[in-house]
Amino acid sequence: MYNVVLIGCGHMGAVHLDDIYTMENINVYGVADLDAERARLFARKYGADSFDTDYMRYLRDEKTDIVICATYPATHLEILKQCVQYKKHLLCEKPMTASLAEAEEFVELARNGGIKVQVGYILRYNETYRKVAGMIQAGAIGKPLVIRMAQNHHVMDWRKYRALLKGSSPIVDCGVHYIDVCRWFTGAEIESVDGICATLDQEVPENAFNYGLMTMRLTDGSVAYYEAGWGNSIAADNLKEFIGPRGRIKIVEREHRLSCQEEGDLIEYYDSVGREYRTINVNCKRRPTGAQLAHLIEMIEDGVPSVPSIDDVYMSYKIAVSADQKLRRKKLC
Ligand SMILES: NC(=O)c1ccc[n+]([C@@H]2O[C@H](COP(=O)([O-])OP(=O)(O)OC[C@H]3O[C@@H](n4cnc5c(N)ncnc54)[C@H](O)[C@@H]3O)[C@@H](O)[C@H]2O)c1
């Protein structure tokens, strides 16, 4: 039985606990949030033994085994340092940190800190993405030529998005997942990035932007784009499509299917050689945080490596930051 402590009782904290609080080998030992009421409600909902506004109480506690960190990126490195000091294993939300210098320190501690560290790249545990990765790697579309990706959020509650925008941008925050997808699916490296950005809403903090489109050139000759906007003026949108000389694959998340949503995601596959269409149903969780935590437990018990590796986590973050900086410079011109 592992005593798990959640730091950060917000949106992603709930996604983590929703999936793990019934696991047989997990006890939700404590929950912490700067907002005491939020922490209290989480403790009640998920049956935590206690709650606090100060996470250090759980770091110092010998009974804590695993920390799940679902706070903003600017706090991640400090929480990792405390986990190293008090020997707690860590599942940390992406993006790994709020700057490249912090990310380098994070990697060093993740490698040599004497604890197990997994950064939450949840798509690596998503059955639909795993299936598409396998299809592409088996040649279903031939060598990928074009990757089209968009992930726009229609914002009603600015509290959270203002907090995220202060330390990051949608290109970095969600972009790390999709940069990782490009590298994972193709096996190629990203050799250059470019793009554009804009500020769409007046609620956006100064020096931030809430709409970006990054383009990527990969070493295998393929190209990709990733569009990300968080705003009230933009509509929610989700596009994931992979095109090659033998066809294309599109992921349709269950909530975007026209019917039978209860059956799961759809993979639409067009074989352009045989001129045939296939639709594959994948009944899976969108954010399988339970599988991700189970992997951390395997790292602890069996010594298996993290998935993705800390090098892959760092690489996708570094590329996202370089795209973000380029977009900001262009915006100022
Ligand atoms: N993997 C994914 O698919 C995914 C999706 C959404 C968000 N995220 C990531 O999860 C993290 C949190 O995002 P969110 O959407 O849950 O935000 P959120 O605002 O809903 O929740 C964050 C919570 O952390 C708390 N918090 C902040 N600093 C704290 C501290 N020092 N101690 C204790 N609590 C603290 C806040 O009070 C808030 O309740 C971000 O890094 C974000 O990028 C990941």
Image: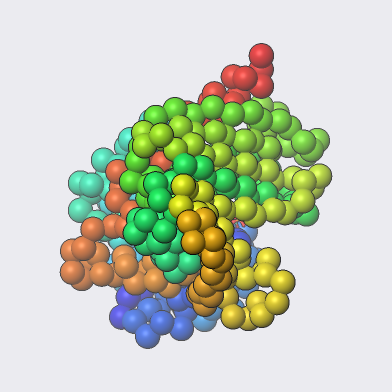
In which quadrant of the rendered view does residue 256 lie? bottom right
The quarter of the picture where the N terminus appears is bottom left
Give the image location of residue 311, x and y in percent. 30, 43
Count of numbered badges drawn on the protein: 0
Residue 197, image quadrant: top right
Q: Position of residue 63 (x, y in %)?
A: 31, 71
Q: Is residue 265 above or below residue 214?
A: below
Can residue 71 be seen in this snapshot? no
Where does residue 136 sit, x and y in percent of width and height?
Answer: 40, 56
Q: Identify the residue shown where x is 23% and y is 66%.
A: 300
Residue 306 appears at what percent x and percent y?
A: 28, 57
> Which quarter of the rendered image does ligand 1 occupy?
bottom right
Residue at 80 percent of width and 35 percent of height: 202
Please give left or right for residue 2 compared with residue 262 in the image: left
**Image quadrant occupied by the C terminus:** top right
The foreground one among 240 and 290 is 240
